[in-house]
């Protein structure tokens, strides 16, 4: 569907930025939300960050995005050649500008010559025939697809996704997940997906990190081949394990 | 062939729809017939005019107190032919427009400065709010002392009256812009000027237009006062001049013209709202 997008990039070639966190601490007032976090993410890696709500996932994402200043420690996001990298965030809410038509929302912050690219990404998310529509007439899932196209049209070195499919119905969510995986496989940018859905965290990324009470407690590699199936035994086992771990930490019992 | 089949299918589906929903159709049409809204709403003012005309004709109201609508209409016609009405109208419109543009530009500039910069807000907002509590028409005697009864004083009064509603609604509109959209704009590489032009301005526009609508009403009010106090041309002057000669018909005409200008302005601003806020679900469905 989106194959013509990636003619310039060899399929599967890893690109994108490196994330490096050293003893990262973030406090709001006296309450620490992130405690001395060390993390390294390689270029082109697709990492999921899960954890209970209030565990600091979104704060970590916002610090990496530069939307919040770290209280202590080092945050480094750079490309392989050490130049500054483009970071874009896709939020849980679509955050479309209601006064811009669909296409104009995708070209927000881009030069005029990005118009063909924006159109192509909208076609890739299946909205090629809605370019001239106002966001108000789109459904929730369609708006979120526009937001995804907008993030991708910026060709970020690092794409941060903050529970992007959390508010969608199960069917739309499954479609969006497949779409995201396809697009990532063709253009290997670094991606950090924050989610509270354990299944989603195992289905899409290469690596799952669990953040709990401001600390990284698990770092799991997912080596399953793609496309992955929800019924895969390895996936089912690890889903149970992760859930148990989260439940014990959160409630003291399974 | 296939197209033909598809057309058949859709047309038959349409027929089915129609057949399966007869109850709803009847119900809806019954409700529409029950209240011919436009007919009733227009018949009331028409009836009032007829009664008014009748009362004057039979002598229940002296024409010097209140002339018949037909007299006012013929007066309007005569004054239009003689050029008196167009000239005065033109002068009044010119004053209103000049005052509105000057006051509006000052208010928008101040509103955006205060809305965007916290420092500017701290410096200016309290003082502006304090001046706002003065009923601006109370300044009329002072304005006459400052500017005399020339054009400047009238334009000053209109500009002053216009600026407060536009200022307040601009500041309010900017404060109500969704901070999450601004955050997104910054993350997607917009600079300060682009943030203002592409997010703050369109986000505040519905509120700004409300302010402009208010302001236009106030512009007329200021104009009436200014022209009635002292002028040598304009609709208000025409009315005051007519009073000297007890030409009640001209006075009533002037009042009617002020009313019509108000309606005209309202139509223009509604049109503007529908053009500028096509994206807004609340405005697209609005009918005039």
Image: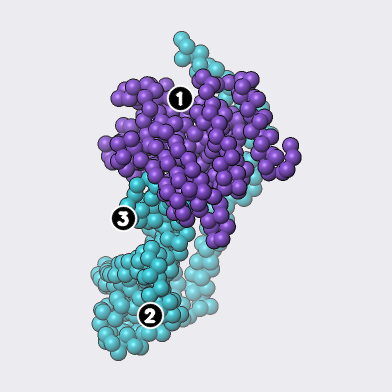
Please give left or right for residue A251 compared with residue A192 in the image.
right
Q: Colour of chain A?
A: purple
Q: Position of residue B10 (x, y in %)?
A: 54, 21
Q: Colour of chain B?
A: cyan
Q: Residue at x 63, y 40 (%)?
A: B28
Looking at the rendered structure, whether the residues under marks 3 and 2 are on a common chain is answered as yes
| Quadrant of the rendered image containing residue B103 | bottom left
Q: Residue at x 54, y 61 (%)?
A: A29
Q: CA distance from mark 1 to mark 3?
A: 36 Å
Q: CA distance from mark 1 to mark 2?
A: 70 Å
Tell me the residue that label 3 is attached to: B193
**Which chain is disc 2 placed on?**
B
Q: Residues within 10 Å of mark 3 (few under 14, many from 20)?
A: few
**Which chain is disc 1 placed on?**
A
Q: Position of residue B281 (x, y in %)?
A: 49, 47
| Quadrant of the rendered image containing residue A236 | top right
Q: Secondary structure at mark 3?
A: helix
| Quadrant of the rendered image containing residue A126 | top left
Tell me the residue that label 1 is attached to: A182
Q: Residue at x 65, y 39 (%)?
A: A246
Q: Residues within 10 Å of mark 2 (few under 14, many from 20)?
A: some
Q: Residue at x 29, y 81 (%)?
A: B153
Q: Secondary structure at mark 2?
A: helix
Looking at the rendered structure, whether the residues under marks 1 and 3 are on a common chain is answered as no
Residue found at the very far right of the displayed protein: A253
Tell me the residue that label 2 is attached to: B225
């Amino acid at each position: 569907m989106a194959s013509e997008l990636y003619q310039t990039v060899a399929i599967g070639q890893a690109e994108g930025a490196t994330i490096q966190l050293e003893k990262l601490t973030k406090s709001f007032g006296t309450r620490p939300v992130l405690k001395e976090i060390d993390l390294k993410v390689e270029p082109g890696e697709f990492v999921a960050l899960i954890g209970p709500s209030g565990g600091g996932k979104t704060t970590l994402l916002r610090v990496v995005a530069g939307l919040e200043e770290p209280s202590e420690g080092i945050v480094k996001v750079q490309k392989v050649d050490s130049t500054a990298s483009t970071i874009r965030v896709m939020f849980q809410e679509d955050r479309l500008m209601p006064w811009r038509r669909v296409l104009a929302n995708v070209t927000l912050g881009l030069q005029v010559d990005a118009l063909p690219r924006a159109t192509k990404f909208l076609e890739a998310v299946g909205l090629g025939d809605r370019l001239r529509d106002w966001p108000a007439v789109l459904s929730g899932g369609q708006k979120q697809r526009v937001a995804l196209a907008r993030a991708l049209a910026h060709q970020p070195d690092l794409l941060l996704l903050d529970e992007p499919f959390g508010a969608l119905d199960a069917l739309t969510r499954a479609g969006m997940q497949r779409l995201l995986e396809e697009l990532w496989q063709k253009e290997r940018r670094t991606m950090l997906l924050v989610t509270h859905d354990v299944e989603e965290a195992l289905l899409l990324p290469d690596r799952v990190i669990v953040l709990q009470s401001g600390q990284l407690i698990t770092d799991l590699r997912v080596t399953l081949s793609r496309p992955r199936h929800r019924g895969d035994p390895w996936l089912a086992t690890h889903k149970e394990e992760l859930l148990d771990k989260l439940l014990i930490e959160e409630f003291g019992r399974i | 062939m296939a197209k033909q089949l598809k057309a058949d299918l859709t047309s038959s589906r349409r027929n089915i729809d129609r057949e399966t929903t007869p109850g709803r159709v009847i119900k809806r049409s019954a409700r529409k017939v029950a209240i011919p809204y436009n007919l009733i709403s227009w018949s009331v003012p028409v009836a009032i005019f007829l009664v008014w005309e009748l009362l004057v004709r039979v002598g229940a109201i002296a024409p010097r107190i209140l002339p018949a609508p037909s007299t006012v209409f013929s007066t309007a016609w005569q004054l239009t032919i003689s050029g008196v009405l167009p000239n005065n109208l033109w002068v009044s419109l010119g004053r209103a427009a000049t005052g509105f543009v000057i006051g509006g530009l000052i208010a928008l500039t101040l509103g955006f400065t205060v809305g965007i910069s916290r420092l500017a807000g701290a410096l200016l907002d309290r003082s502006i709010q304090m001046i706002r509590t003065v009923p601006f028409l109370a300044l009329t005697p002072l304005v006459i002392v400052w500017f005399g009864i020339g054009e400047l004083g009238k334009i000053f009064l209109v500009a002053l009256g216009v600026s407060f509603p536009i200022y307040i609604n601009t500041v309010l509109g900017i404060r109500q812009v969704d901070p999450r959209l601004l955050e997104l704009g910054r993350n997607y590489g917009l600079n300060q000027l682009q943030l203002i032009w592409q997010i703050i301005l369109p986000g505040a526009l519905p509120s700004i237009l409300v302010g402009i609508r208010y302001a236009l009403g106030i512009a007329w009010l200021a104009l009436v006062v200014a022209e009635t106090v002292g002028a040598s041309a304009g609709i208000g002057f025409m009315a005051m001049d007519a009073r000297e000669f007890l030409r009640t018909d001209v006075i009533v005409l002037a009042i009617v013209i002020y009313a019509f200008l108000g309606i005209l302005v309202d139509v223009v601003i509604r049109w503007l709202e529908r053009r500028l806020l096509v994206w807004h679900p609340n405005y697209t469905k609005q009918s005039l």
